[in-house]
Image (cartoon, rainbow, N blue to C red):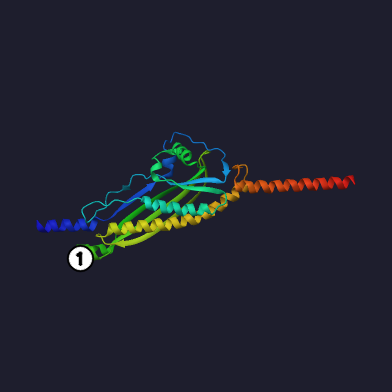
């Protein structure tokens, strides 16, 4: 009986640490919760300078295959991005928007203001509350897999289970910033960022290592997303200039951005008028 119990315990140690974790926030599930409801975007009217909001899409439930096992006797669970991490990521996105002369203000929206499956109705509420024109919705998807390597054979000894890093981990992360014009329900542009992290762990510190890998994956993906956001902001400005049939641009009364454009146009009109007057005077003379 003792030998049988020992064999069962060792088998549990050897096979108990493989599995998969998956946690995410889905942009599609948030904006289009009812697949039968059709949302038809219209031509966006960009009231320059724009008022921009930045928010995280609400979390989905954490999913896994149930095969993870913890030496503490409890099943580990994936920890989604904390509110502090969300605010730091949103602040990084805000710094890129601040560099643009067509942006007048930026608001970081707390997670509690977005409701699960809230859709564009929820965005309209946020728009009214903050006076926004555009919102950047951040979403993420992270998958962690753990498999046992050849070194897991050392788990037959207690020392091996504590000392040998026989668990092979991989963490795939996607971060995405989708920028919408709220009144028209139009997607203006998006900027994704991805990362892949590989690691090893003992079965004893598997939870701790997976949390570290998750944090590193988010950091790498966010850096790539910020780089792509810089590119997409410049491309968006160019598209607005080159494709007037897709974007209507207006200027807020009294704004320096619109005022400078209007002043430039006025000077051009005055110059044209002066040139026409001089030409007419010469012809009469």
Q: Nearer the viewer, residue 231 or 271?
A: 271
Residue at the limit of the structure toward the left, as seen here: 1
**Residue 245, picture quadrant:** top right
Inspect this view and state whether residue 154 appears: no
Residue 271 horizontal side relative to residue 156, left or right: right
* Residue 212, image x, y percentages: 33, 59
Q: Nearer the viewer, residue 67 or 85?
A: 85
Residue at 58% across / 50% down in the picture? 237
* Residue 175, image x, y percentages: 43, 52
**Residue 219, picture quadrant:** bottom left
Residue at 45% across / 53% down in the picture? 91
Residue at the limit of the structure toward the right, as seen here: 285
Query: Which corner quadrant holds the N terminus?
Result: bottom left
Which residue, given by chain and number where applicable, does mark 1 sit on? 159
Q: Secondary structure at mark 1?
A: helix
Q: Nearer the viewer, residue 112 or 60?
A: 112
* Residue 61, image x, y percentages: 33, 44
Residue at 52% across / 45% down in the picture? 51
Q: Nearer the viewer, residue 228 or 22?
A: 228
Q: Residues within 10 Å of mark 1 (few under 14, many from 20)?
A: few
* Residue 234, image x, y percentages: 56, 53
In this view, 181 is above or below 191: above
Inspect this view and state whether residue 257 appears: yes
């Amino acid at each position: 009986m003792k030998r049988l119990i020992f064999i069962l315990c060792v088998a549990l140690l050897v096979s108990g640490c493989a599995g998969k974790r998956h946690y995410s926030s889905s942009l599609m599930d948030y904006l289009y919760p009812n697949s039968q409801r059709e949302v038809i975007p219209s031509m966006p009217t960009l009231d320059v300078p724009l008022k921009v909001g930045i928010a995280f899409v609400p979390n989905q439930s954490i999913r896994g295959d149930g095969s993870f096992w913890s030496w503490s006797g409890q099943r580990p669970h994936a920890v989604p991005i904390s509110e502090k991490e969300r605010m730091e990521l949103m602040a990084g996105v805000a710094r890129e928007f601040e560099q643009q002369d067509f942006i007048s203000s930026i608001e970081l929206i707390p997670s509690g203001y977005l409701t699960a499956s809230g859709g564009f109705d929820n965005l309209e509420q946020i728009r009214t509350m903050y006076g926004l024109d555009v919102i950047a919705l951040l979403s993420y998807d992270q998958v962690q897999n753990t498999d046992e390597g050849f070194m897991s054979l050392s788990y037959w000894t207690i020392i091996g289970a504590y000392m040998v890093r026989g668990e092979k981990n991989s963490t795939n992360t996607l971060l995405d910033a989708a920028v919408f014009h709220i009144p028209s329900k139009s997607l203006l542009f998006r900027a994704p960022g991805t990362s892949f992290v590989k690691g090893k762990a003992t079965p004893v510190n598997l939870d701790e290592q997976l949390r570290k890998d998750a944090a590193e994956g988010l950091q790498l993906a966010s850096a790539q997303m910020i780089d792509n956001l810089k590119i997409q902001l410049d491309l968006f400005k160019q598209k607005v200039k080159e494709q007037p049939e897709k974007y209507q641009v207006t200027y807020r009364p009294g704004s320096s951005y619109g005022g400078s454009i209007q002043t430039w146009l006025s000077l051009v009109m005055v110059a044209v008028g002066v040139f026409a007057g001089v030409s007419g005077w010469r012809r009469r003379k």
